[in-house]
Image: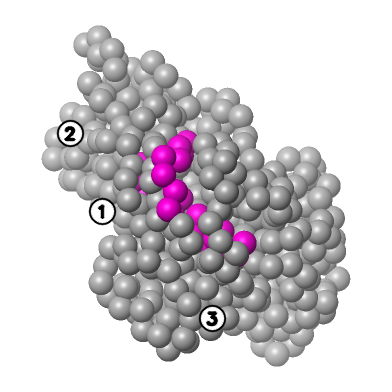
Amino acid sequence: MSPELREVYAALLERAPENRIEPDLSRIMRVMELMGDPQHAYRSIRIAGTNGKTTTARILERILREAGLRTGRTTSPHLHSPVERIAIDGAPIDEEGFLQAYRDVEPFAAIVDAESEAAGGVPLTYFEYLTAMSFQAFASAPVDVAVVETGLGGTWDATGVVRPDVTVITPISLDHQEYLGETIAEIAGEKAGILTAEATAVIASQPYEDAADVLRDRIAELGADAAIEDQQIGVLARTPGVGGQMLSLQGIAGRYEEVFLSLLGEHQARNALLAVSAAEALLGDGGTVLDKDMLTDALSSITSPGRAEVVRQSPTILLDAAHNPAGALTLVETIRENFRFTRTVGVVGILAEKDAEEILGALESVLDSVVITQSSSPRAIATDELADLARDVFGDDDRVVEQGSLPDAIQAAVDLSETEGDQFGGVIVAGSVTLVAEVRDLLGVPQED
């Protein structure tokens, strides 16, 4: 980052942190009102769920761009730089664009901060300020449509100031219980907060029936049009291949045979289904089949950094954030389906608010050994503490290596994967977005859009 961007980012970080919810939309609504409600200057699609939001947003945005629309995309968290959170036409805005968006919001944020503090409240949070910046940048571009990923939950999330034409809910599982509720039903209730009577809802098949029940009841209560996976829409067939998979999809409007998706894993096929269906709903109100060539071009060129991402060969190094138990289980399924490693070694670092034992338990089934480390995040579990937990989970001290230095952890994992001349060793880096981002930097992986 440039010195000016570092200064601005530091000012943003001084606000309430991203993982803290202030359950009140009054601040973000007020700042947007003062700015003239730029979020209403374009159409929008809003995405919520526990896992798969960012990739679904990236696929959807790519389809809409291929269809000729100018797009905005806001996702979180970022891997390397905060500018990644605001993308226009598929590329992060440059530093000057980010700084300009910050300056555009600044005078209005000052008014809202003062009003809120005078009433005994808190100033705009980090995420609220970034959300306002995103919507302002999209209006300034201007874009035709914004693809908007929620931060946490849905009901009280700052992205709720948009009036979505389409809403998408990915699979829901346990995560952020301290903010969203202790049960699947409570969490689903928060996610269902993005649904509206006016927006077509595209709903993933849910791993928990309680979540499905909550979403179904809310859709019925609103009288909203809905396309639900395994009912109106579905993945009809898929064949894993080199660098991706061949899919047949049933969307809202039509059936798409043999389209290649350049991402690995069944979960990515399902994410693609949601994206295709949402695009149908936006582009033709669910009644117009997408052009096959356009869809093929879009799906075959998708990238999703830090999500089942192969960044090196010999040994293969695979990066996946896998920051909650459901994500870890999905990663395990992807490894089993797509790789035949003779020896598999993990590099794992997890943040303190996550269910580390469950994440480790899921990964244990595919790892011959694990190198426990930590990222530079102040929320990272200390290496020695996480290593003690890993020894309990793996049940064999010889399978757990403790290495606080991340570069040394990577080297240790590479060495272990090649023990006894294994020719097809694999290194799996997982456990948090910050860990994956730092490994990408260490390995010199180019920052992608």
Could you tell me residue 226's position as x and y percent? Answer: 44, 73
Q: Is residue 96 left or right of residue 434?
A: right
First reached walking from the N terminus: tag 1 or tag 2: 1
Left or right? Give the position of 216 relative to 42: left
Label 3 vs label 2: CA separation?
52 Å
- Magenta range: 255-283
Q: Residue furthest left?
A: 395
Q: Amino acid at mark 3?
A: Thr
Hey, which quadrant is residue 45 in on the image? bottom right
Q: Dot 2 corresponds to which residue?
A: 397
Which quadrant would the C terminus be assigned to in this image?
top right
Task: Indicate whether residue 92 is drawn in magenta.
Answer: no
Return the mark for residue 196: 3
Q: Nearer the viewer, mark 3 or mark 2?
A: 3
Q: Using the image, determine if residue 236 lies above or below residue 185.
A: above
Task: Return the disc, 3 or 2, that comes first in the chain's sequence.
Answer: 3
Q: Is residue 174 left or right of residue 194?
A: left
- Residue 191 at least partly seen: no
Q: Residue furthest top?
A: 421
Secondary structure, mark 3, is loop
Distance of label 1 from label 2 (alpha carbons)? 18 Å
Quadrant of image for the N terminus = top right
